[in-house]
Amino acid sequence: MSDSTSPDTALQERIVRQIRETLVQIGRLAHEASSADEFHAALLPLVLEALAAPAGGIWQLAGEEGWQLAREQFLRPWAQRLKEQLEDAAREAWQQRKAVLLRIPAQDDQPGECIVAVPLGEPDVLQALLMVVVDRDAGPKVQEGYRSFLEQVRQLAAEFYRRQGLEQLKAESRRWQQLAAFADRVHRSLDLNETAYALVNETLALLDADRVTVLVRRGKHYRVKAVSGQDLFDPRSRLVRRLQRLGTAVARTARDFTYSGPEELPPQIQKPLQAFLEESHARGLWILPLVPPEEPEPPEETIKDTTVRKKRRKGQQLPEGLLVLEWFESTGPGEASRQLLPQVRKHAAVALGKSLEYQQLFLLPLWRALGRSWLVRKLRQLPVSLTVLALLAGTIGALVLVPADFEIECPGTLEPVVQQRVFATAEGVVQQVLVEHGQEVRRGEKLLQLKDVDLEVQLADLSGQLLATEKRLEAVSAAILAGKHLSEVERNRLLAEQAQLRKTLDGLREQIALYRRKLEQLEIRSPLDGQVITWDVRRRLEHRPVARGQHLLTVADLSQDWELVLRLPDYRLGHVQQALAQQGDKLPVRFFLASEPEQTYRGELLAQAMELRADVHPQRPEEANVVLVRCRFDKSQVRFLRPGTTVRARIYCGRRSLGYVWFHDLWEFVQTRILFRLL
């Protein structure tokens, strides 16, 4: 049984392998083919060979002409009958996005056939239709195999059409970029010579012509204005004169002229054309009249200019210029150049027309000479100069005459009025910190405990001396009382020693009392009822040595009034004093907190609340002195009062000119740093 089935199995495996190899070849072809003709020419034989089909063909959409047979193998006998069903087959295949089966009935002496139609193209665009003649007697499974194989072919071909679509989009994008560059160059100048030379050279590169010439109308005749690749040409040469006669003859026809080989032409064109070709030896020749796009004209009854009326009565006139394209090896432009030609012609007509219109201006050389003269340039700039001077004068006048509020800005802090700084009363090491920031304290409450080891050692030494002296005094007193048999000399000596020991005891007790008072000074107590406002007291002081008189912390009564302490630089003090002399003993102050810059508060500066104090600034030692200015304000207007809150304040110093308000710092700098050194 295995012997009878093995040949069929081997045949099936060989067929499957061949189909797979064919699909691989089609996939490679879809990635490598450079054009639709090349792809179709290689695709059709592969499909027919894989299906062992007797005939097949590929139909393409050719614009208005409809479906055209682009590639076929032995399909001519069915071509006419297929074309009758082509539209319906293409529509059905495209709607279903898969291969469809067509049956062509027998007709006359031609037998009927079975044909599979496959739509080819991008996912959303139908571009071709592949038709394969298959065995009309094949069973349903075989026909399904045909459809399955051709469906895979359709999917592989879609990659080729997608790639071709991308290439076409890239090519079109490049063409539009080239056209934009062409338009930019030809419209760059109004000079007729520059425009004509730009036209011929840019058109030569854009349309792949071998030579481009521009002719301009002079009366009823045309004269060569520019030739591509030539800065100079001889207007009396035979080639130029014959081209001018040919251009004049073509312009009178008011139609485009193309030549790609011998043909019957009117005698008024045939003769000058033959004469020109004898000199030019061109195989392809295009002569295109350059007519600018027509502008909409007003109705007849609204036209007042008689010259316009005459032009309208004359009708169409001769074109202002001609664009001549020549090819020496080919007979005309390629497909890409043909697509660009209408836009190139339009831009060329507009650019040449504008240049001619500019060239015909009355007394143009005189206007050019005047435009290049120094006097005209100065006069042209005169309105601008006068405008600038007027603006400058107006600005200076406003700075001098317009009054504005003059305010001095300086930094400061919010502080409670009742506060007292706590200093170290003795040298020592902070042994214990008993309070924290923000803690409420009472007057006399212990805040810190200092420790002086030397003081404790001296106190212990004095205590030992006191104890020894007391014992010695007791021994001497006992000896005196018990000494009945003592000699007079010995008794007097003991009495003298007793008196001396008593004096020593008095001195030691006084020293011990003094040292005990020093120990009491190591206890730092609050000078008033209030709150500790020093930040991070424990970290700053605990286990750190302090000197006598050193500031340790600050206690303040926050329930009392608050004040604004400003640091006014001394070089700004004169403005404040002058304002106080003019306005009285107080000045308005407005300030804002660094934590609430959007909210402005108000206060008052009192003349008696200014204190001059030296304060060395590490970055600006020349601005060392500042004046501490204390301002009062209503504490109820500030929601959150915190000692030491940073503020920026402005002290009102009267009305000054706007220029002085804005630039007084600059003026003071010039006075102190420049004028003072010069005078």
Image (cartoon, grey):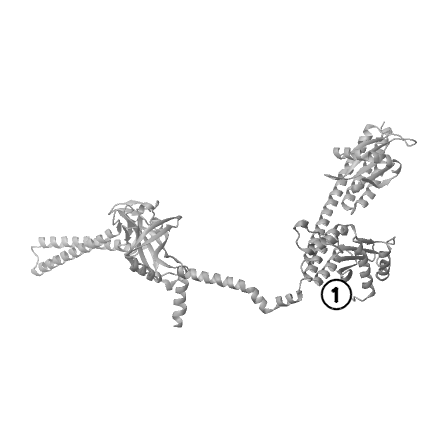
Q: From the viewer's side, name the closer residue of 365 and 7.
A: 365
Q: Is residue 390 left or right of residue 327?
A: left
**Horizontal placement of 384 versus 11: left or right?**
left
- Secondary structure found at label 1: loop
Q: Quadrant of the N terminus?
A: top right
Q: Is residue 542 visible?
A: no
Left or right of 37 on screen, residue 420: left
Residue 300: image location, x then y, percent: 68, 50
Residue 27 in view: yes
Q: Is residue 91 above or below residue 206?
A: above
- Residue 388, position as x, y percentages in the image: 50, 62
Counting other residues with Cα less than 10 Å from the Cα at mark 1, is it few (<14), some (14-19), or many (20 or more)? few
Where does label 1 land, which residue?
231
Asked if 617 appears above or below 133 in the picture, the reply is: below
Residue at image coords 41%, 66%:
670
Q: Residue furthest top?
A: 1
Q: Position of residue 612 (x, y in %)?
A: 30, 60
Type of amino acid at the residue the image marks with label 1 = Asp
Quick check: 65 above or below 655? above
Image quadrant containing the C terminus: bottom left
Question: In which quadrant of the rendered view does residue 290 lie?
Answer: bottom right
Q: Nearer the viewer, residue 85 or 7?
A: 85
- The one of 236 and 478 positioned closer to us in this rendering: 236
Where residue 78 sits: x, y (%)? 87, 35
Seen from the viewer's position, the closer of residues 602 and 338 is 338
